[in-house]
Image (spheres, helix red, strand yellow):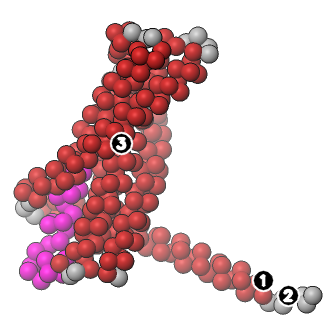
Amino acid sequence: MTSASPTTQPRSFTAWADFQIRRVRTFVEEVGAATLLAGRTFRTMFTTRFDTSEFIYQLEQLGVRSLAIAAATAIFVGIVMTIQFAVSMEAFGAKDTLGRVIAVSEARELAPSLTALVVGSRIAAGIAAEIGSMTVTEQVDAIRALGADPIRKLVVPRLVACVLIMPLITFIAFILGMISSMLVAALSYGIPMEFFFSTALDSLRINDFVSGVAKTPFFGFLIAILGCYFGLQTRGGTEGVGRSTTRSVVVVSISILMADALLTQIFVSLGTL
């Protein structure tokens, strides 16, 4: 067997290193471009007339039409978490504290983060696909040619709508998750609904709601900005629209998880948890 050329491994390593450097450079450039888009959006939001009709339309598209998937997620997560906690706590004779554990978990983490992940993926994909289709068919260029600002027409209404509807959807998800959990606890584990409700209510503090709901506007901001960014960066026809949609879902999901970890640490440092 002939030995490999001594220059083969360095060449392959050099190619690998160059590839990784290009990936890091591309990532930094995209973060910078998305940040610039966010800055332009805030500047446009406060310096130009707000498009109220488009904002109301986006409230329906992004908010009302996301309620079903948010409700389904909240209900089934509540059911699963109740079963898991009940089995574990029953082994230690602490089943009566189930309402307390579920309430705090839902308020602080489950309702905000899981709702943002599921609803955010849907919203980001829809925004990226819609704006991406407009980009590849040159409708965005047509808006510029008519003297209008695509940021004002496309990005600002979606951003404001997404930031405003996420806390409301999260609150609805929390209520539905608690109801489903209470029903499962009563029907499957014999915990009276009145007792479950009272212990859950006693365990909740205002800080639990604040620390959970306060995250959601940041999640909404990330969802809208990243969805719009990938839509505006779409190239390559319908295939490019598919790539942008997929990337928006992946990046938004990772960004929400990273933001959730960062915001949780900030709230802990501030003493709100």
- The residue segment tinted magenta is 140-162
The quarter holding residue 183 reads: top left
SS class, disc 1 = helix
SS class, disc 3 = helix
| Circle 1 residue | 9
Q: Which mark is residue 115?
A: 3
Magenta-colored stretch includes residue 76: no
Q: Is residue 201 left or right of residue 98?
A: left
User: For the residue marked with disc 1, what is the amino acid?
Assistant: Gln
| Circle 2 residue | 4
Q: Earlier in the sequence, mark 1 or mark 2?
A: 2
User: In the image, residue 100 lies at what x, y percent?
Assistant: 44, 18
Q: Residue furthest front?
A: 187
User: For the residue marked with disc 3, what is the amino acid?
Assistant: Thr
Q: Residues within 10 Å of mark 3 (few under 14, many from 20)?
A: many
Q: Earlier in the sequence, mark 1 or mark 3?
A: 1
Residue at position x 25%, y 73% in the image: 133
The quarter holding residue 150 reads: bottom left
Q: Residue furthest right?
A: 1
On-image quarter of the N terminus: bottom right
Residue at position x 39%, y 59% in the image: 249
Judging depth in this view, the residue of 231 and 24 nearest the camera is 231
